Image (cartoon, helix red, strand yellow):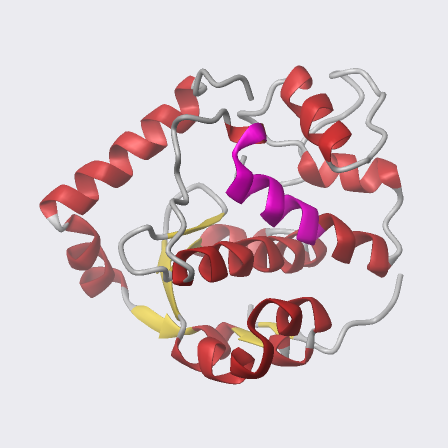
Amino acid sequence: MKENNFAISSAKQGGDATIDPFELILLTILRVFRTLRLERMLRFLTGTHSFTDYFKGFEKVEAVRQLFGEKTEQVLRNLKVHLIPIWGYMWVSNMDGHIIVSSRYLNSGSKVDIYLDVIHELTHVKQFLDGKELFDVNYGYTERPTEVEAYRRAVVEAKRLGLSNEKICEYLKTEWMSEEDLKRLAKTLNIECGRSKDQVSPTHP
């Protein structure tokens, strides 16, 4: 595995056009937060930080520079990270495009998983800046264009790091993704995930 010039101080997201129950609950919660402006209150109570305070060196990562080009340093310098002390991984707010991260994941998650998740979420940040709908419920999770693009960039980076197909499949698998969802996503990404559900288990906490 190649070494990367980045550091993480001390952190996943999971297809039919029918949205799965777990994601529906998450989207409902996000809409409630948006409607009642609770997200701003939560950020006030738990703190918002600069992306570069917690994720250092990403401005030098080619996969990130491909996203933002000459504006990479500016975007990352202005990007905010909101840490929350609950179960979960990380996602991008559809209110203002900042990244929300589970502090538990950041402290205990696999550094490789966190790194790839950051690439995934920065793709969503770029999509947000481009005015794209991040949570389009007209698509199932593994078929949603914004998710496919984010996973594709993460997979390209995983291959650059030297991860095997087996490890990439383990990375892709989430608690709310069925075996069929995984196979559908893997096929879209040209990854061979032929193992059974019992053999492929989430690597995230």
Q: Is residue 205 visible?
A: no
Looking at the image, which is closer to me, 86 or 16?
16
Which residue is at a point 77% across and 72% down the rendered structure image?
4
Is residue 143 in sight in this rendering? Answer: yes
Residue 139 placement, left or right of 200? left
Query: Residue 142 in the image: x percent, y percent?
Result: 58, 29
Above or below for 169 versus 73: above
Which residue: 52% across, 34% down?
Answer: 144
Residue 110 in the magenta stretch? The answer is: no
Residue 186 as seen in the image, left or right of residue 115: right
Where 66 sits versus 194, above or below?
below
* Picture residue at 85% right of the left edge, 21% below the top: 194
Position of the N terminus by quadrant = bottom right
Q: Residue at x 69, y 66 (%)?
A: 63
In the image, residue 17 sits, relative to residue 27, either above or below, namely above
Q: Which residues are magenta?
A: 143-154
Instruction: Name the side, left or right, on which 171 lies relative to 120.
Output: right
Q: Quadrant of residue 114?
A: bottom right
Measured as percent of width and height from the top left, residue 78 is found at 39, 78
Outermost residue toward the left?
36
Q: Horizontally, is 124 left or right of 148 in the view?
A: left
- Looking at the rendered image, the quarter that the C terminus falls into is top right
Residue 11 locus on image (x, y percent): 53, 54
Q: Which is the main secondary structure of the residues drawn in magenta?
A: helix
The image quarter containing residue 2 is bottom right
